[in-house]
Amino acid sequence: TSPGHLQLGVMMKITSVFESEHLRIGTAGSLFIVVYAGATSAEEIAIVDREEGRFIEQRGKISLLSVVVQSGGTIDRISEEVRAAALEMVKKYQHHVTADAVVVPARGILAAIIRTFMVGFSLVSRRPYPNKVFGQLNEAIAWLKQVPGQDQTFADSTTDHSSVHAFTS
């Protein structure tokens, strides 16, 4: 594969569109992938907002896959500014999203707290599309593929998730 691309099964490539120490963004078919590693700033939410907007302009309808990677043995505080920016982004793009899966792949009490926060954020944001929080990436991808209205090229892609694992690790 070429630099910036990873295979998603045999039918889709993951294209890396942004990468920094705490944030990685990629796309595969109609899937918009964001990896949050460590504390997230309002500036990083603005980058996600910009790239999601660009992707929606290209694709029309998209699905979201967010992976929250725990940094060390602590939970990074999410500022009110970051929460407000994220909520605004959800509202802005809500009519362009088919489904949203969030993965917190860590185990233990800290991961459970993060997953609980993400479920609460989903409730507060009142999204008009299916959204779910997972502990494992494979479960999230399988769920996204079966959501009604899912883009067929993504839904029909092979079940080999190794490239998504590689991108989100």
Image (spheres, rainbow, N blue to C red):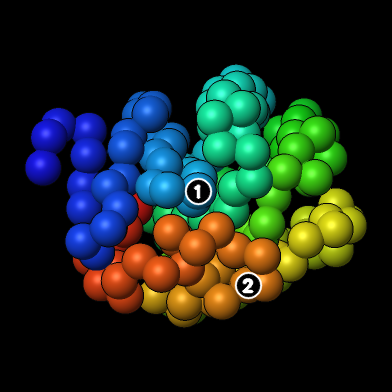
Report which residue position mark 1 lands on.
30
Give the residue at x 61% y 34%. 56
Foreground residue, 67 or 17? 17
For label 2, count other residues whose C-alpha is less than 10 Å away and answer few (under 14), some (14-19) or many (20+): some
Q: Residue at x 32, y 37 (%)?
A: 15
Three-letter amino acid code at disc 2? Val
Residue 42's tag is none
Left or right: residue 132 compared with residue 5:
right
Name the amino acid, label 1.
Answer: Ser
Residue 162 in the image, given as x and y percentages of width and height: 23, 65
* The C terminus, quarter of image: bottom left
Of the two numbered discs 2 and 1 on the same chain, state the one appearing first in sequence: 1
Q: Residue at x 12, y 35 (%)?
A: 2
Quadrant in the picture for the N terminus: top left
Residue 42 against residue 38 in the figure, above or below: above
Taking the image as drawn, is residue 29 in sight?
Answer: yes
Residue 49 drawn at (x, y percent): 64, 28
Q: Residue at x 49, y 50 (%)?
A: 31
Q: Which residue is identified by label 2?
A: 147
Quadrant of the rendered image containing residue 40: top right
* Rendered view: 55 above or below 158: above
Say left or right for 54 vs 37. right
Quadrant of residue 85 in the image? Answer: top right
Q: Residue furthest front?
A: 152
156 lies left or right of 87:
left
